[in-house]
Amino acid sequence: MKQNKNLIAYCGLYCGQCPGYEGKIADLARDLRKELRRAKFQKVAHGLTKYFKQFKDYDQSYELLGLMVKFRCKRTCRNGGGPPFCKIRKCCVKKELEGCWECIEFETCTKLDFLNAVHDDGHIKNLRKIKRHGVSKFLQGKKYW
Ligand code: SF4
Ligand code: SF4
């Protein structure tokens, strides 16, 4: 995929790496649901619960796949994608910064903390790289997610 600086989010994550942007998981979930319906697999799964207890979760799993079908975001962070309440984006826009890498506070900023649950310190590693080497070098190299 062509690297694009507009895909670098304010927080340092790269939208081009986001499963929501890539859309592959959503496509596969949609196709699997379609195939399960075609095969009338719900009845099979319910019938097999006697032998495989995991099939008891079939309906829940089908619902979960439905949620994953909706897991798409083509807009990207800079075009209003992602959570509309994001304090990081609001803060960068207010400070007129390209991203948190231009801010002296990013190593200790608590606004970034909510990302840890999904990304660990991936965004911080990216911010350090962008700060140290610049946007072009960052785009060419490894990005953390
Ligand atoms: S919306 Fe916020 S958390 Fe999401 S990518 Fe943009 S800056 Fe990062
Ligand atoms: S204070 Fe700095 S590091 Fe924190 S969200 Fe705002 S720009 Fe980013």
Image: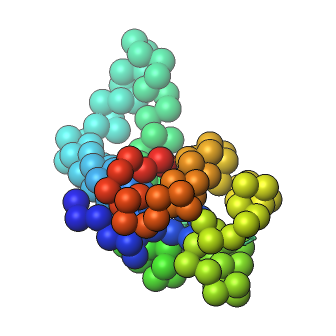
In the picture, measured across the screen, residue 62 lies left or right of residue 127, that is left
Quarter of image, res 128 = bottom right
Q: Nearer the viewer, residue 17 or 41?
A: 17
Locate residue 7, reporting x and y percent.
40, 70
How many numbered circles does the render carry? 0
- Which quarter holds ligand 1? bottom right
Residue 66 visible to the viewer: no
Image quadrant where residue 105 sits: bottom right
Residue name at image x 55 percent, y 78 percent? 98
Residue at image coords 65%, 79%: 92
Q: Which residue occupies 32% across, 70% down? A: 4
User: Which residue is outermost to the front?
Assistant: 132
Q: Find residue 95 and report its horizontal and vertical position in percent.
A: 70, 84
Picture layout, residue 124 above or below residue 15: above
> Where is 6 relative to 27, above or below?
below
14 relative position to 30: left or right: right
Image height of 123 relative to 77, above or below: above
Q: Point out residue 84 in the picture as x, y percentages from the top left corner.
A: 62, 77
Provide residue 48's location: percent of width, then percent of height: 36, 21
Quarter of the figure with the N terminus? bottom left
Most foreground residue, 88 or 129: 129
Image position of 57 (left or right of 27): right
The type of colouring in the image is rainbow
Residue at x 71% of width, y 61% of height: 106
Q: Is residue 2 visible?
A: yes
